[in-house]
Amino acid sequence: MAPRGGQSSTKTSKSPDFGNSDFVVVANRLPVDLERLPDGSSTWKRSPGGLVTALEPLLRRRQGAWVGWPGVADDDDELDYRPVLQDDLHLHPLRLTTDDVAEYYEGFSNATLWPLYHDVIVKPIYHRDWWERYVDVNRRFAEATSHAAAHGATVWVQDYQLQLVPKMLRELRPDLTIGFFLHIPFPPVELFMQLPWRTEIVEGLLGADLVGFHLPGGAQNFLFLSRQLTGVNTSRGSVGVRSRFGEVELASRTVRVGAFPISIDSTALDQAARHRDVRRRAREIRAELGNPRKILLGVDRLDYTKGIDVRLKAFSELLAEGRAKRDDTVLVQLATPSRERVESYQILRNDIEREVGHINGEYAEVGHPVVHYLHRPVPRDELIAFFVASDVMLVTPLRDGMNLVAKEYVACRSDLGGALVLSEFTGAAAELRQAYLVNPHDTDRVKDAIEAALNQPAEEGRRRMRALRRQVLVHDVDRWARSFLDALSESHPHDGS
């Protein structure tokens, strides 16, 4: 049974209890959300997301378990935290209180680590209380995982919220094979060194047998920091994509370090985009927008790393200069709400919505805005229809670990139509070389790329999209997961059983 939460001691003690799952995924969130109903009861609701898509087939094949938070803060310990079988998935819910969410998640994870790992676009906040809560919650995740995992099981820990779990879990269960994958960028050395708890984070990750990043650069930064902060010996050669792993030599074992660019379920998206209902809805979207000659599209979480302001500024200037026509070109921005209790995100929303209003006030006609802005989640089939309907996809983050939206757009364009304008500061840029690659800090070059994409010859557009689709359809999410787990299976944990 998973622990029922609350504050735990500062020491981990070796647990004698084994679970019965040979494969365990550990993530901040479960693949389902617990929803409280008006009558006081609760129900599970499926949580869509790339991680769920990637790992669910593996969990089913291996009869695995998933440890995570169900998405509801619980101060009174009112909910049932016993393991549950939901939709044939073995779930181990972990309780978080309101203070846990405020300090571990909204605080240290998203106001300290997130901005630090995204090139300090917003200044990170360093609070000792947040760090202590992060340690405590990571320990509870490790303890819950220890109870879920069978003897000798494989455990895959996910992302920046849980970077201390590998070391804590190894202390509890040295019999386990432990992998860790970071879904966001790993920062340059000089930025990471600002973190007061830099050594603890590196040591936490070194509890794993395999530490994975999207790109070779992140892996090599981690190898350097391991040498610098812990004094261990590491390999010094270059790290390749899904090959040429780096190694960290510890006293009793070797940690492998590698690059594994994540992807999407491209086949499923390709098939969905071909469906007659989706094609019909795409035509309806164009009609609802006034049948413009060209539709520009942005799809993002409302986050300061995503560069939504970059594309708004570029589009505004293109309209002002007459390089985009207000009567035949529109921009649709779909912005999913995100971290709405965090002040920097509240400020961002106000700024974006003010700029949308300014552009429409300057260039729109009555009943015909030039920017259509939606601040709400969009259902999957509707999103696919927007991908099919649009002529130019704008993906302009200032920093992004991968950016799966770019790959999703490409997967949906079986007609070989459309064009992709892509920030070179995304992980996806290393793979999607036939996109119009831009430096989002250079507004003039962003404008040039948008103009080129709007006016590209049909044959050039098909050539670019054909090459992009070849990359995305071959390197799908299943290949990502298999390549990581194959590399992990070649690791040999210290035999502490």
Image: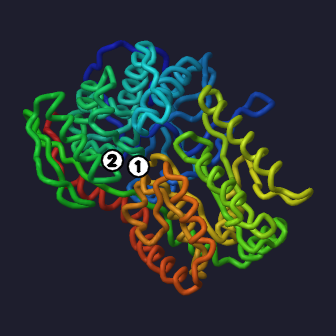
Q: Residue furthest right?
A: 366
With 352 as the anchor, is 104 left or right in this view?
Answer: left
Q: Residues within 10 Å of mark 1 (few under 14, many from 20)?
A: many
Depth check: 44 or 332 in front?
Answer: 332
Using the image, tell me which numbered label, if any, was put on residue 28. none
Mark 2 or mark 1, which has the lower sequence index? 2
Residue 152 makes an appearance in the image = no
Please name the residue shown 50% across and 31% down the image.
122
Residue 445 visible to the viewer: yes
Measured as percent of width and height from the top left, residue 414 is found at 57, 79
User: In the rendered view of the protein, which quadrant contains the N terminus?
Assistant: top left
Residue 341 appears in which quarter of the rendering? Answer: top right
Give the structural element (helix, strand or loop) at label 2. Answer: strand
Task: Identify the amino acid type marked 2.
Answer: Asp
Rendered position, 63 above or below 495: below
Residue ID at (51%, 59%) = 445
Mark 2: give few (<14), some (14-19) or many (20+) Cα within 10 Å: some
Q: Identity of the amino acid at label 1?
A: Gly
| Left or right of residue 218: residue 184 | right
Residue in the picture at 62% in, 55% down: 314
Identify whether 228 is placed above or below 335. Answer: above
Q: Residue under label 2, please give it.
A: 22
Q: Nearer the viewer, residue 178 or 105?
A: 105
| Display coloring | rainbow
Under tag 1, what secondary structure?
loop
| Residue at the front extreme, as displayed | 321
In this view, the residue in front, 6 or 204, is 204
Quarter the C terminus occupies:
top left
**Callout count:** 2
Mark 1 lies on residue: 64
Q: Are marks 2 and 1 in contact (CB under 8 Å)?
A: yes
